[in-house]
Image (cartoon, rainbow, N blue to C red):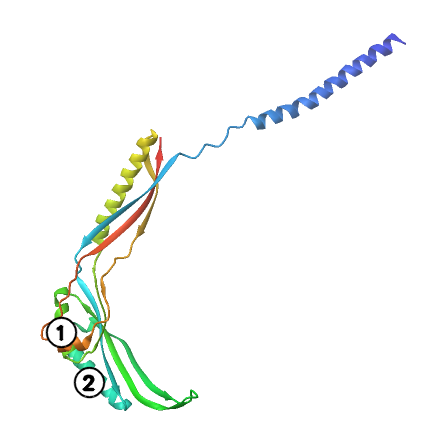
Amino acid sequence: MNSRFVHNFAIIAVAAAALMIVTIIPASAQESTATLMPPSPAAPSTISVSGEGTVYASPDVAYLEVGVQTVDVDLSQAFGQTGDKITGVLNALKQLGIEDKDIQTSGVNVTPQNQYDNNGNLTGTSSYTVSNSVEVTIRKVDQVEAVLTSTIKAGANSINSLSFGIQDTNALEQQARAQAVAQAKDRAGQLASALGVTVGKPLTVTEVPQNIPVPIFGRMNAAALSSADGGQPVSQGQLSVTIDVQITFSIG
């Protein structure tokens, strides 16, 4: 074989190999660069705890629903008698200093007592029941007994409910909230100590307010109240304001 041809062939082969190396190296470098990218920072370690605060206080307002119910064979008579008696109840409330804004009619109802034959057919009406009730806000809780006695004597024969409340709970909520947060921080500290870590800053805080529980008296026997010589004793007790919090702390 011609030596010059062999020499030229060798040069071409080396150049081709060099070209292949140049083509492969960039791809390899590109793959290496993607692999060595720094990972995203990890989420911080946390402790999540809950806390509860409860504050007690005496009620300063009462809510009463009182009414009149009359039964008569004549609808006009029943309607008129109920109207006269509820007017007397309203006058008794005003004499005790209850303002108009604190008295609201809650319902006026007329219910016929129908009669039916053996086949279920309406044969007539034996009587009518007419009722009228009002909701009363009593802003002086020491007046509750007097309100009950006066309205019964004025003609009320139905007391549907009596409950107590607190008009402004802002100060109580603030105290309960501070208690709840303090309890949550104490729990977080106990957990951190047991785990051998330290408590950091709070990351999230969620407050869950609770409804104020109120003692409720059931339907009272108005006839018994009206025949009693003395008043009707009422115990107002205490109410509570409760707030729950859920706090997530960072730990180190």
For the point 29% across and 86% down, the residue is 128
Q: Is residue 141 left or right of residue 38?
A: left
How crowded is the residue under tag 1: few (<14 C-alpha within 10 Å), some, or many (20+)? many
Expressed as whole percent of the image width and height from the top left, the position of residue 125 reads: 34, 90
Dot 2 corresponds to which residue?
84
Expressed as whole percent of the image width and height from the top left, the position of residue 28 reads: 64, 24
At label 1, the amino acid type is Thr
The earlier-in-sequence mark between 1 and 2 is 2
Mark-to-mark CA distance, 1 and 2: 18 Å
169, above or below 186, in the image: below
Image quarter in which the N terminus is found: top right
Q: Which image quarter: residue 218?
A: bottom left
Image quarter in which the C terminus is found: top left
Q: Which image quarter: residue 82?
A: bottom left
Dot 1 corresponds to which residue?
149
Q: Secondary structure at mark 2?
A: helix
Q: Secondary structure at mark 1?
A: helix
Question: Contact, CB < 8 Å: mark 1 with mark 2?
Answer: no
How crowded is the residue under tag 2: few (<14 C-alpha within 10 Å), some, or many (20+)? few
- Residue placed farthest to the left in the image? 229
Q: Is residue 161 left or right of residue 21?
A: left
